[in-house]
Amino acid sequence: MRNLTPAKLVVMMVVAMGLLVAVYVGKQLMAKEPPRVVDNTRTVPMAIADLAPGTVIKDEHIGMGRWPANEIVGDILLDKASIVGRVVRKPMTAAEPIHGNALFPMGELPPLTVSDGHRATTIHLTESAAVMSGLLRPGDHVDVQFTPTAGATSDPRYQKIGAMSVVLFKGVRLLAINRLFVQSDLAAGGNNVTLEIAESDVAILRLADENGDLYLSYNPIPNGTSTVTVANPDRPTLEELLQLPPIPEEPVAPQPNVYRSWVYSGSGGRMTTFVNGVPSYGNVGNYDYNGSVAPNQSTVAPNGVNGNGYPNGNNAGGGNPGFVPGAAPINGFNPAYGPQTSNTPIGIPSSRERGTPDSRYPGATQRTASAR
């Protein structure tokens, strides 16, 4: 190292640096340019979670993701605005492009499908509890309870009961809630529920919806039966829905025992009507009820002619119609035939209403004996 002088050291350093520069330049000259990376993907709308048929797509259901551009073909939708608001027709998988045929056209809902002999009927439920606070979902089967409002009816039979709740249907199918065919959040202002009801029960459900509150409860048994029996399914009544007891029948008045008899006196005769064994005065039937006579005559006036104006045996001529010989009137009263009036002051006024028995008349036995 005796020969290592500062000059030699400087020369060695310069040579080393030259070698490094030569190596670097050589590598740069020999290096190949790396291939350029080409981004062959495109951002498209995708569902952020799996979506079932019947779902109405909302903004929060859709995200944006990248997908190979060469695979974006056919009816894959590229615009989020063309997706939101449409209804899912086919099951959709998360993080995949959305095909147009997987959705119903904008503004179109799935068609309703009901069983034979049934109808789809929508009712409005104001309380969330009436839909079990959102636990029910389309496709479930439910019971329908009916609670009449306070002013639904003034029927005294219902007022006597006070209040009631009636199960109208059991195990009917729930088709949709608020036009949705999948379970979703309930609306705060009330919810529309569509049920599958037998054709003969549609009017019953409508009548109940208009006269009270309806509630749904989950029923795992899909029997779809009605508990209400009505005389005419097209015209049910609130009385039938409430199953009120029948109105008691009013007692029928007993029919009187009525018979007529002819009584002859001398050359004349008259007909007398007896009601329950008591002679009755007035005008009913074809023969002037109790045989009121025509003026100044002792014979019956057929069909009430000329006799209508002479109840209680009145005789406008002042005589004593039907008077039995030897039975003299006393104060206008014939002991054999009952009260008689005349033009004399002592006659008994005929103020009695037609058709009423005269308790003063001695009766059929004495009358027959007097007639003899």
Image (cartoon, rainbow, N blue to C red):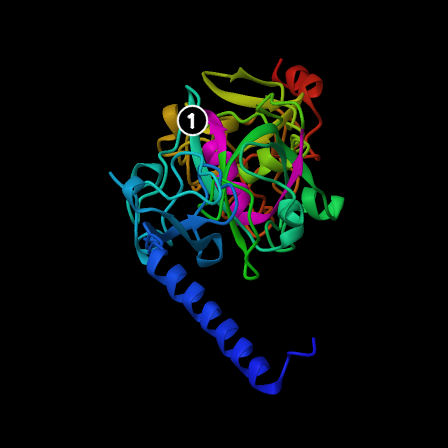
Left or right of 327 in this view: 88: left
Q: Position of residue 6 (x, y in %)?
A: 61, 86
Label 1, secondary structure: give it: loop
Q: Residue 254 occupies which quadrant of the picture?
A: top right
Q: Which residues are magenta?
A: 196-219
Inspect the magenta stretch and tell me whether residue 257 lies in it: no
> Which residue in the rendered view is the most extreme toward the right?
161
> Which residue in the rendered view is the most extreme toward the bottom?
6
Depth check, front residue: 261 or 180: 180
Q: Amino acid at mark 1?
A: Val
Left or right of 169 in this view: 31: left
Depth check, front residue: 188 or 79: 79
Quarter occupied by the C terminus: top right
Q: Position of residue 173 (x, y in %)?
A: 54, 30
Q: Position of residue 10 (x, y in %)?
A: 55, 83
State the count of labels. Answer: 1
Q: Position of residue 130 (x, y in %)?
A: 64, 48
Quarter occupied by the N terminus: bottom right
Identify the residue under disc 1.
114
Residue in view at x 54 percent, y 27 percent = 230
